Amino acid sequence: MRTHPNVQRVRKALDAVGLSSDIVILPESAPTAAAAAEQLDCEVGAIANSLIFSCAQEPILVLTSGAHRADTKLLAQAAGGSVGRGDPEFVRRHTGQPIGGVAPVGHPQPIRTFIDNWLARHDRIWAAAGHPYSVFPTTFDELMAATNGTAIDVQL
């Protein structure tokens, strides 16, 4: 799994921004935050869900805590226009990665990114690494720097 092209792209992207986090290969697929948290023995809120939305046909990446859902009205305010969830084809076209494995980095082009302030409550955050079996540990500050993200509240 470490040699999967998506995982390799994420590794290169992490290296490029100075993050030496080890990519962890899970024994089972973790397409949900609950599945990842169970395998990693951590709180579901420490899982950074990578959600791809569309705003004016452009992708927006929202890294939200696995403990709650993103409010699209708040996202629309932050993005400056209406937003809708990207379908699997939209997600893969803009990230090169499948739903359930979308990483915060390693995409063909930079994606405008919003990061849930809730994630700052955790010393260690786990994010997908390009494939539903792969994750990496990080921090809120590292995610902000690596993605050039904007911190927002994604739920009321």
Image (cartoon, rainbow, N blue to C red):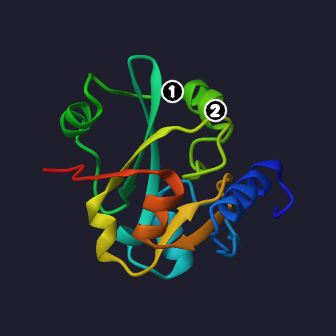
Please identify, in this view, whether the residue under mark 1 or under mark 2 is nearer the observer: 2
Residue where numbered disc 1 is placed: 87
Q: What is the x, y in percent for residue 93?
A: 64, 27
The label shown at residue 92 is: 2
Q: What is the x, y in percent for residue 13?
A: 69, 55
Q: Where 39 sits versus 96, above or below?
A: below
How many numbered callouts?
2
Q: What is the x, y in percent for residue 112?
A: 45, 38
Furthest toward the top, the residue is: 56
Between residues 6 and 37, which one lies in front from this camera angle? Answer: 6
At a point 42% along the width and 69% down the height, the residue shown is 141
Between residues 145 and 39, which one lies in front from this camera angle? Answer: 145
At a point 37% along the width and 61% down the height, the residue shown is 66
Label 2 Cα neighbours within 10 Å, binned few <14 / some 14-19 / many ≥20:
some
Q: Where 91 sits versus 132, above or below?
A: above
Label 1 Cα neighbours within 10 Å, binned few <14 / some 14-19 / many ≥20:
few
Residue 42: quadrant of the picture:
bottom left
Furthest toward the right, the residue is: 3
**What is the quadrant of the N terminus in the image?**
bottom right
Task: Determine whether, in the image, residue 133 is placed left or right of residue 84.
Answer: right
Q: Where 5 sits versus 82, above or below?
A: below
At a point 26% along the width and 37% down the height, the residue shown is 75
At a point 45% along the width and 17% down the height, the residue shown is 57
Circle 2 — which element? Answer: helix
Task: Determine whether, in the image, residue 6 is placed left or right of residue 85.
Answer: right
Between residues 70 and 37, which one lies in front from this camera angle? Answer: 70
| Mark before the other along the chain sequence, 1 or 2 | 1
